[in-house]
Image: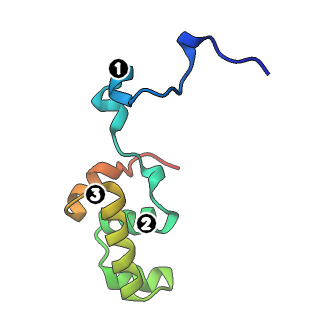
């Protein structure tokens, strides 16, 4: 296996900012969410309530609330609206 030339190496020991990373390199991606977190956010974006999502997914309301809180944390969002914007669920998986 050959190694990449030093100028083409992707990983290094310098912090991302020192490697010339931009703000775009730090945008949150939906891939950091679990499948259930993505699903719950999709249902919310389509106007479903937590109770409806729980019924559809065969989970408890507490499970769905916990899932949404976890998604907020993963996306570093302060609200569901912000989480939906950051998750950009318009892209298909």
Q: Position of residue 1 (x, y in %)?
A: 80, 22
Residue depicted at 57% across the width and 19% down the height: 9
| Residue 18 as seen in the image, left or right of residue 37 | left
Q: Position of residue 33 (x, y in %)?
A: 45, 58
The residue beneath circle 1 is 20
The residue beneath circle 2 is 37
> Which of the two discs, 3 and 2, labels the residue nearer the N terminus?
2
The residue lying toward the viewer, choosing from 78 and 53, is: 78
Q: Position of residue 5 (x, y in %)?
A: 62, 11
Q: Secondary structure at mark 3?
A: helix
Residue depicted at 36% across the width and 82% down the height: 52
89 up-or-down from 68: above or below: above
Q: Secondary structure at mark 2?
A: helix
29 up-or-down from 24: above or below: below
> Which of the two discs, 3 and 1, labels the residue nearer the N terminus?
1
> Which of the two discs, 2 and 1, labels the residue nearer the N terminus?
1
The residue beneath circle 3 is 83
Label 2, label 1: how far apart the Cα atoms are: 32 Å
| Res 19 quadrant in image | top left
The residue lying toward the viewer, choosing from 12 and 22, is: 12
Circle 1 packing at 10 Å, graded few (<14), some (14-19), many (20+), is few
Circle 3 packing at 10 Å, graded few (<14), some (14-19), many (20+), is many
The residue lying toward the viewer, choosing from 14 and 64, is: 14
Circle 2 packing at 10 Å, graded few (<14), some (14-19), many (20+), is many
Q: Which mark is residue 80?
A: none
Residue depicted at 36% across the width and 45% down the height: 28
């Amino acid at each position: 296996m050959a190694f990449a030339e030093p100028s083409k190496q992707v990983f290094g020991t310098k912090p991302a900012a020192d490697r010339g990373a931009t703000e775009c390199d730090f945008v949150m991606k939906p891939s950091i969410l679990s499948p259930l977190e993505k699903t719950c956010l999709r249902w919310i974006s389509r106007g479903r309530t937590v109770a409806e999502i729980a019924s559809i997914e065969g989970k408890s309301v507490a499970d769905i609330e916990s899932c949404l809180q976890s998604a907020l944390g993963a996306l570093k969002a302060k609200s569901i609206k912000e989480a939906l914007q950051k998750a950009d669920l318009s892209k298909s998986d």
